Image (cartoon, grey):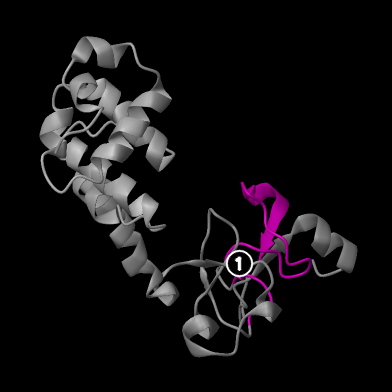
Amino acid sequence: MDSPFEGVVLDPVKCSKMSMEERREIVYELANWSHGAPEMLQSWSRQDILQILCSEMGKERKYTGLTKLKIIEHLLRVVSEKRLGSNKSGAFEAQSSPAVTHKASKRARKSDHPTHLPIPVTDLSTMSNEGDLDTAAFCKNTACKANLSREDQFCKRCSCCICHKYDENKDPSLWLTCSSEPPFLGDSCNVSCHLECALKHGRS
């Protein structure tokens, strides 16, 4: 198909002297051709083609795994679809970035089963009564992460049974533990508390 752009497209020297906007106009013109458009753009440098493609898509990409012809075909497709008001370039991006797509699909699969993921809990009273969330509570102490039930008001493994607070680095010299080991006899509740809290509340 004859076009006033044809001589310019086939001449790399003339093409290099054109502005970005002029080159875009040529691409838009070629996108209307029924055939031969990709071959016409083969004389352009890969950098010029990528520059226009990134401009049309609104983001920078390298497309290092694709031939120049594939990039040209995609550019013409993007321009054609842009004219129609729809951008359907997702399939091409999946081809150029399989690793990114693979990771995204893994995240999507994980989101299908949110109850399998740890749920940070700051207030057990706000837990939902539905599904598995009742049993998905964990201690908010990152060093502990013990499983908690809805009935637990605090983590008996690492928190003070009086003030219900925990220490990031639990210093044994500042804590008391209810124990039935010698020399202590009798039943043990196996919980611990701050020494300071015990003295304040007279539980020592």
Q: Amino acid at mark 1?
A: Pro
Quadrant placement of the N terminus: top left
Residue under pointer 1? 183
Identify the residue shown where x is 28% and y is 22%. 48
Identify the residue shown where x is 37% and y is 74%. 112
- Left/right placement of residue 93 relative to residue 188 reads left
In percent of width and height, residue 120 lies at 57, 65
Identify the residue shown where x is 61% and y is 77%. 188
Q: Choose between 176 and 7: the one closer to the eye.
A: 7
Circle 1 residues within 10 Å: few <14, some 14–19, many ≥20: few
SS label for mark 1: loop
Q: Choose between 50 and 156: the one closer to the eye.
A: 50
Q: Residue 114 is drawn in which quadrant? A: bottom left
In percent of width and height, residue 123 lies at 69, 72
* Start-end of magenta stretch: 152-179
Q: Is residue 73 above or below residue 41?
A: below
Q: Choose between 156 and 125: the one closer to the eye.
A: 125
Q: Is residue 170 visible?
A: yes
- Left/right placement of residue 91 relative to residue 151 reads left
Q: Is residue 52 visible?
A: no
Q: Choose between 178 and 137: the one closer to the eye.
A: 137
In percent of width and height, residue 63 lies at 23, 34
Identify the residue shown where x is 40% and y is 69%. 111
Asked if the magenta segment contains residue 154, the reply would be: yes
